Image (cartoon, rainbow, N blue to C red):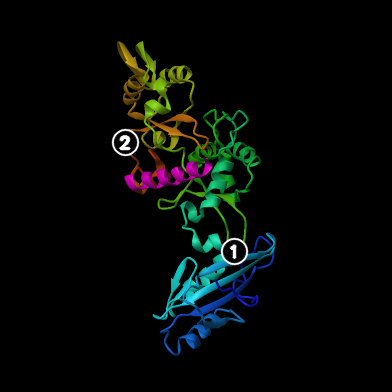
Amino acid sequence: MRTAAKTVLVAVSLASAVWAGGVKPRVSLELLTRPGLPLMASQQWFKVLTDLGVSGLQIHAGGPRDEVAITQQGSKASPEYRVVGILAADNSLYLPGGKFSLTDSGRLRKWLDELGDQGAAGVTEKRSAFGLIARQLEQVNADLKKPVGFSTKGMSGVKAVSQVAARLDFPLVLDEEAKRELTGVKVAEELSGISSGTALAVMLRPAGLVLEPVRPQGGELQYRVGKAQADHQAWPVGWKPEAKAVKVLPDLFEFLNVEIKDTPVSEALEAIEGRLKIPFLFDHNALALYGIDPTQVQADVPSKRLTYTQILNKVLMQAKLKYELRLDEADKPFLWITTVKPVPQEQGGIGGYGLEWRAQRGRDNFWRGIMRFVRRRRA
């Protein structure tokens, strides 16, 4: 494979970016031409690329075995990238991860920016959730699987979120508006032992806030807290397990003799939660929307031998509720208690699977694919 003869600085116009290393990486660009390239093509590409700020560009004939490539040199703190591209007979420019025409100056600028910002992975790897590349999503999941190590029930939302954030590897950005929204919120559940990602999603929901992992261009990974938006990705309250429920939580299918008379749904659920020894987390947004208070609804289950899942279904249905078995980032199971009636789109999708799940098969498959990938990488 041919490589560039010298290192050339690619001066990409991105004055507003703040780069993690403080200095934009150096990039050298060498274009190799294939037989049959139109006569004026080299001059045309030279103009397009120099107009983008590329200086010292090399364009010359290549051999039949030449391939596109990116080679990283320099140190981790101050990397340099040597790029080999191909100018094909159809006057298309082939670079690692992309094919460009003469009219694709915008896409080319973005490609150069991504290369300088995230290296070869930034231009060759497919983006996944939140616009992150695979390695970044894996880092986020590993960070958010850390368990909450303190009692949360009754804490102020701001204090609880701040304490969880203090143990994370990446900073959590909580602006003044988000702080105001959280000020009057108390954490209703005991989230000690729950993974940080799921716990944060639960804490933020009553304030209409969501968690989003982001990586600003030229910066480092961080968690942004913002207002829930109907068509915006947000970190979910747990994940649907890929395995069948009987494999994930066999105790749900254990038979027992049961009789419940004139007992508040909340008390019945508390008793079952103690027996199953897993957390029950409530979708307070959905319950508030439909005016459902489990403490004010009486549950009755005639004397019979039933499984826990049958008991739960009977008790919850009397309050127009249902449960969903989910896993936190550390694959620990919990039950998500939400409303049978889905939340309308115009209400922001907060309820059921909420704005982060969408309760749509395509959305479910998307998140299943993401978690399948993360677990495969973890293994």
- Viewer-proximal residue, 200 or 121? 121
Task: Kindly state the secondary structure of the residue where label 1 is placed.
Answer: helix
Q: Measuring from the top left, give residue 269's x and y in whole percent.
A: 42, 21
Quadrant of the rendered image containing residue 197: top right
Mark seen at residue 117? 1
In the rendered view, tell whether residue 292 sits above or below residue 302.
below
Q: Is residue 213 visible?
A: no
Please give the count of numbered marks on the rendered protein.
2
Task: Kindly state the secondary structure of the residue where label 2 is placed.
Answer: loop
Residue at coordinates 38% horizontally, 17% vertically from top-left? Answer: 254
Q: Which residues are magenta?
A: 361-379
Q: Measuring from the top left, give residue 102's x and y in whole percent.
A: 44, 80
* CA distance separating discs 2 and 1: 45 Å
Mark seen at residue 341? 2
Mark seen at residue 231? none
Q: Does the magenta segment cover residue 85?
A: no
Q: Amino acid at mark 1?
A: Asp
Q: Residues within 10 Å of mark 2 (few under 14, many from 20)?
A: few
Quadrant of the rendered image containing residue 53: bottom right
Seen in the image, is 134 located left or right of residue 156?
left
- Viewer-proximal residue, 69 or 321? 69
**Of the residues under marks 2 and 1, which one precedes in the sequence?**
1
Q: Main secondary structure of the magenta part?
A: helix
Residue at coordinates 41% horizontally, 46% vertically from top-left? Answer: 369
Q: Amino acid at mark 2?
A: Lys
- Toward the bottom, the furthest residue is 39
Q: Nearer the viewer, mark 2 or mark 1?
A: 1
The N terminus, quarter of image: bottom right
Q: Measuring from the top left, give residue 73's x and y in whole percent.
A: 65, 65
Residue at coordinates 44% horizontally, 71% vertically from top-left? Answer: 99
Q: Does the magenta segment cover residue 372?
A: yes
- Viewer-proximal residue, 210 or 375? 375
